[in-house]
Image: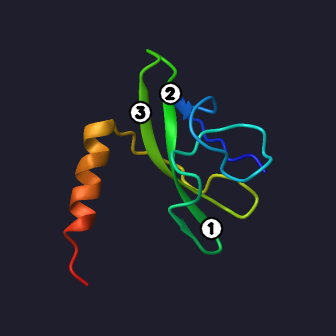
């Protein structure tokens, strides 16, 4: 299992956080378990900007083998993550 995603500018920061699955040998997940899991898993990941070294985050879907399922990424900083949490918490079911 890989659980690492990278594009031209950003990559999963495997030096921070938690392992996506026990025993994979690197870190990267912000939480100690997936945010959502069914046939695929959704993680919030630590990300590093390869150009300037800034730390940020992205949500990443992985298949059951740890392969990324997204061809594009949405990189966010801490304030952006807080906005997502606020917006999710306002949902009325």
Q: Which mark is residue 82?
A: none
7 horizontally vs 23: left or right: left
Q: Are marks 3 and 2 in contact (CB under 8 Å)?
A: yes
Q: Quickly name the residue at label 1.
A: 40
Q: Earlier in the sequence, mark 1 or mark 3?
A: 1
Write down the quadrant of residue 73 in the picture: top left
Residue under the point 33% across and 35% down: 77
Q: Earlier in the sequence, mark 3 or mark 2?
A: 2
- Dot 2: what SS? strand
Q: CA distance from mark 3 to mark 2?
A: 6 Å
Q: Which mark is residue 56?
A: 3
Q: Nearer the viewer, residue 6 or 66?
A: 66
Residue 50 screen position, x and y as percent: 52, 21
Q: CA distance from mark 1 to mark 3?
A: 23 Å
Residue under the point 57% across and 60% down: 34
> Label 2 crowding class (10 Å Cα cut-off): few <14, some 14-19, many 20+?
many
Q: Quickly name the residue at label 2.
A: 48
38 horizontally vs 56: left or right: right
> Label 3 crowding class (10 Å Cα cut-off): few <14, some 14-19, many 20+?
many
Q: Nearer the viewer, residue 59 or 29?
A: 29
> Label 1 crowding class (10 Å Cα cut-off): few <14, some 14-19, many 20+?
some
Q: Are marks 1 and 3 in contact (CB under 8 Å)?
A: no
User: Quarter holding the C terminus?
Assistant: bottom left
Residue 3 screen position, x and y as percent: 68, 47
In the picture shown, does residue 85 fall above or below 46?
Answer: below
Residue 81 screen position, x and y as percent: 32, 46
Q: Are marks 1 and 2 in contact (CB under 8 Å)?
A: no
Residue 70 screen position, x and y as percent: 54, 53
């Amino acid at each position: 299992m890989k659980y690492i995603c990278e594009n031209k500018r950003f990559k999963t920061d495997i030096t921070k956080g938690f392992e996506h699955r026990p025993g994979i040998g690197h870190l990267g997940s912000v939480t100690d378990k997936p945010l959502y899991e069914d046939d695929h898993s959704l993680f919030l990941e630590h990300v590093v900007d390869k150009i300037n070294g800034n730390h940020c985050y992205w949500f990443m879907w992985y298949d059951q083998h740890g392969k990324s399922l997204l061809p594009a990424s949405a990189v966010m900083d801490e304030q952006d993550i807080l906005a997502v949490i606020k917006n999710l918490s306002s949902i009325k079911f």
